[in-house]
Image (cartoon, rainbow, N blue to C red):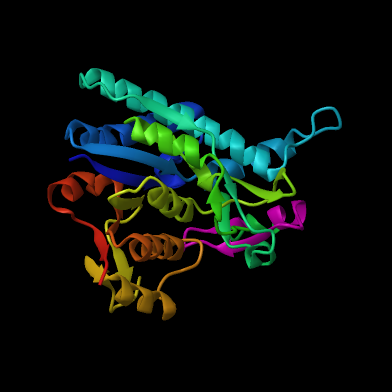
Amino acid sequence: MTKRIVVALGGNVILTDDPSAAAQQQAIQQTAQQLINFLAAGDVQLVLTHGNGPQVGNLVLQQLQGSSVKNPAMPLDTVGAMTQGEIGLWLADALNYEISIRGLSQRVATVLTRTVVDEADPAFRQPTKPIGPFYTVDELPAIKQQYPDWQFVADAGRGFRRVVPSPKPVSIMEAAEIQALVQDGVTLIAGGGGGVPVIEKEGHVTGVEAVIDKDFTAAKLAELVDADELLILTAVRYVAKDFNQPSQTMIKRISVTEMQQLVDAGQFPAGSMKPKVEAAISFVRNTGRPAVITSLDNVQAYLADGDGTVIVPE
């Protein structure tokens, strides 16, 4: 029986220190070399989603720096769609190449996805989603002066980043199309960057200035396609309790109730590990199936014996 896994790839898995297209495509090719191991097993179907925080922030800066009356900068939702198409293209091309050289036969498709959000979501009043490049303490004053309406936060000790609203996904507009492709056995890329955030009202669909956290959309996607497992790939092999403290311990297997208790105790930072853990909890509670958080370079160990932070139902 084929095991269906939804895999959420972090935007930082794609972006390297070199933000050029060639460098990002090379990073995605390396990612595809890991992902192809799932398909080579022969009894796994992948549904992929990916982050776009670094890419969307960088593209916003490009838009603003090149903006003019004749060629104005595009709004954040449109820039999100641009990066969703960009990364979806690169990832599909990379997977097609790996499938070809391995002599496999899986088909790959990318679906540009719109995600419905609630315009009353409190996230619009309290931005938490980091996007774009990191700034040092010395660089920060100049950026704030240039863009006084932007808000910034310290991001996991790596510097400061701009934060934007990150409303929770309510539904996925392309749900029926995604389900049809998955039922047809396609290796699917969907919900990139969390999907383009939109509001539905009186038959009209309107984009909003926000970036949805891809992990929450991944959990929605996993429920939608009846996934056997949700796999969230990030920069670390395990989720840590008491991160960066002398008492730090790595979490390898934990019940959904125990993990919720750690969230309630403030163990995980907003905009970083917290949404990954909350998305995993949501999937486990709603489906009774496991979720795993681990790193891309740990995929082989995960495939061999389920290594990583595994969140299980009661």
**Residue under the point 76% across and 58% down:** 149
Residue 18 screen position, x and y as percent: 47, 36
The foreground one among 303 and 297 is: 303
Residue range corresponding to the magenta coloring: 142-164
The foreground one among 280 and 183 is: 183
Q: Can residue 311 be seen in the rendering of this structure? A: yes
Position of 27 with respect to 169 (left or right) is: left
Residue 206 screen position, x and y as percent: 71, 45
- Residue 254 located within the stretch drawn in magenta: no
Quadrant (top left/top right/bottom left/bottom right) for the N terminus = top left
Q: Can residue 135 be seen in the rendering of this structure? A: no
The foreground one among 282 and 74 is: 282
**Residue under the point 75% across and 53% down:** 147
Residue 12 screen position, x and y as percent: 44, 46
Asked if 120 appears above or below 226 in the picture, the reply is: below
Asked if 232 appears above or below 40 in the picture, the reply is: below
Position of 141 with respect to 185 (left or right) is: right
Position of 215 with respect to 120 (left or right) is: left
Quadrant (top left/top right/bottom left/bottom right) for the C terminus = bottom left
Q: Quadrant of residue 164?
A: bottom right
Residue 121 screen position, x and y as percent: 64, 64
Asked if 109 appears above or below 114 in the picture, the reply is: above
Q: Quadrant of residue 4?
A: top left
**Residue under the point 53% across and 30% down:** 86
